[in-house]
């Protein structure tokens, strides 16, 4: 069952087509990842779902209800541009946002989330005294404190250190387990791979990927090799069948040409250097993202 549906949605700003005939369906209870380069149309799509923008064409249904002038009910939204009242105390900010959302038992909710996200000791401090990461966690709490049915997070992990990113990740998974549907945009492909039930990629306003990670990887096949050798990149020079090398220092990720036998690549590499690791694998989401969005990419078919 889909909780959000877009059908042939288009949004333009002057002569710029930000989103072009976009259709997608967000399954209820899922974690749905939005990915794409800067300026691709992610935030515009999110803002249309949130009724900040209205589409020029197409239809948007949220919980089966079409776009209209009424306020969205039971939806939490964390925008990319964070905004908090800096002179207010932390607990007062949360009380304010909770009342705006029609929340109940706010004192208990505020105490619970401040403790969970390691902000309890800052409850009576002004927002302006918090670090950037702390303010980001505070805005996250303000968004999800009432545990809305739909939670939309625009770049929730941006700027967070690994410890706080882990705390936020656990909180998001906990909300999903309680029944919320989570949509979040991110540039962290590793996080998207590990967390998302479905992944949607937009590029130049067009949908280019949409499905589970496995479905997306199946589109590209097993054309990737991971190699660790004594000599590194120099050992791969001049070997036929290699179309691209992504160098990670100790390990090289190799993309092979269509029809190339990986065993022949291995044999050629072994002539040049001792091989410590050789693995045939499907491309990572990061590699797929680069294939689509890199400046030297070939045109892709829009999904």
Image: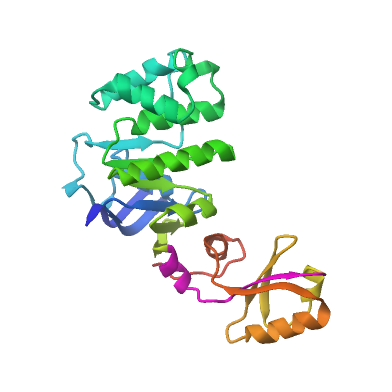
- Percent coordinates x, y for residue 235 in the rendering: 80, 74
> On the image, which quarter does residue 286 sit in?
bottom right
- Percent coordinates x, y for residue 88 in the rendering: 43, 13
Tell me, yes or no, if residue 13 can be seen here: no
* For residue 13, side relative to residue 245 (left or right): left
Residue name at image x 42 percent, y 25 percent: 114
Residue name at image x 26 percent, y 41 percent: 149
- Percent coordinates x, y for residue 174 in the rendering: 37, 42
Coloration mode: rainbow
Quarter of the image with the N terminus in it: bottom left
* For residue 63, side relative to residue 211 (left or right): left
* For residue 282, side relative to residue 93 (left or right): right
Read off the magenta span.
213-230
Q: In the rendered view, would you say 45 is above or below 260?
A: above
Residue name at image x 57 percent, y 76 percent: 223
Tell me, yes or no, if residue 297 can be seen here: yes
Q: In the rendered view, would you say 135 is above or below 222?
A: above
Picture mark count: 0
Given residues 107 and 91, the one toward you in this image is: 107
Given residues 256 and 302, the one toward you in this image is: 256
Q: Is residue 225 magenta?
A: yes
- Percent coordinates x, y for residue 140 in the rendering: 42, 32
Quarter of the image with the C terminus in it: bottom left
Residue name at image x 41 percent, y 46 percent: 184
Q: Is residue 18 magenta?
A: no
């Amino acid at each position: 069952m889909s909780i959000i549906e877009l059908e042939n949605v288009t949004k333009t700003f002057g002569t710029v087509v930000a989103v072009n005939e976009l259709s997608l369906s967000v399954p209820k209870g899922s974690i749905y990842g939005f990915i794409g380069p800067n300026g691709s149309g992610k935030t515009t799509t999110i803002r249309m779902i949130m009724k900040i923008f209205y589409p020029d064409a197409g239809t948007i249904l949220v919980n089966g209800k079409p776009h209209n002038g009424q306020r969205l009910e039971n939806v939490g939204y964390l925008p990319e541009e964070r905004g908090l009242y800096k002179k207010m105390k932390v607990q007062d900010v949360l009380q304010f946002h909770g009342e705006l959302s029609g929340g109940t038992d706010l004192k208990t909710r505020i105490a619970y989330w401040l403790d969970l996200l390691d902000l309890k000791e800052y409850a009576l401090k002004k927002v302006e005294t918090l670090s950037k990461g702390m303010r980001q966690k505070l805005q996250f709490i303000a968004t999800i404190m009432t545990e809305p049915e739909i939670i939309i997070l625009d770049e929730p992990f941006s700027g967070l250190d690994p410890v706080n990113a882990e705390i936020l990740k656990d909180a998001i998974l906990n909300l999903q387990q309680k029944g919320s549907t989570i949509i979040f945009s991110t540039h962290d492909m590793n996080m998207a791979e590990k967390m998302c039930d479905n992944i949607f990629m937009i590029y130049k306003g067009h949908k280019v990927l949409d499905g589970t990670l496995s479905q997306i990887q199946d589109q590209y096949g097993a054309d990737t090799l991971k190699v660790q050798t004594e000599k590194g990149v120099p050992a791969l020079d001049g070997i036929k069948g290699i179309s691209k090398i992504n160098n990670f220092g100790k390990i090289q990720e190799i993309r092979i040409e269509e029809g190339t036998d990986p065993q022949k690549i291995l044999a050629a590499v072994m002539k040049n250097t001792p091989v410590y690791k050789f693995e045939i694998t499907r491309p990572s989401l990061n590699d797929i993202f680069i294939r689509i969005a890199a400046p030297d990419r070939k045109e892709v078919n829009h999904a």
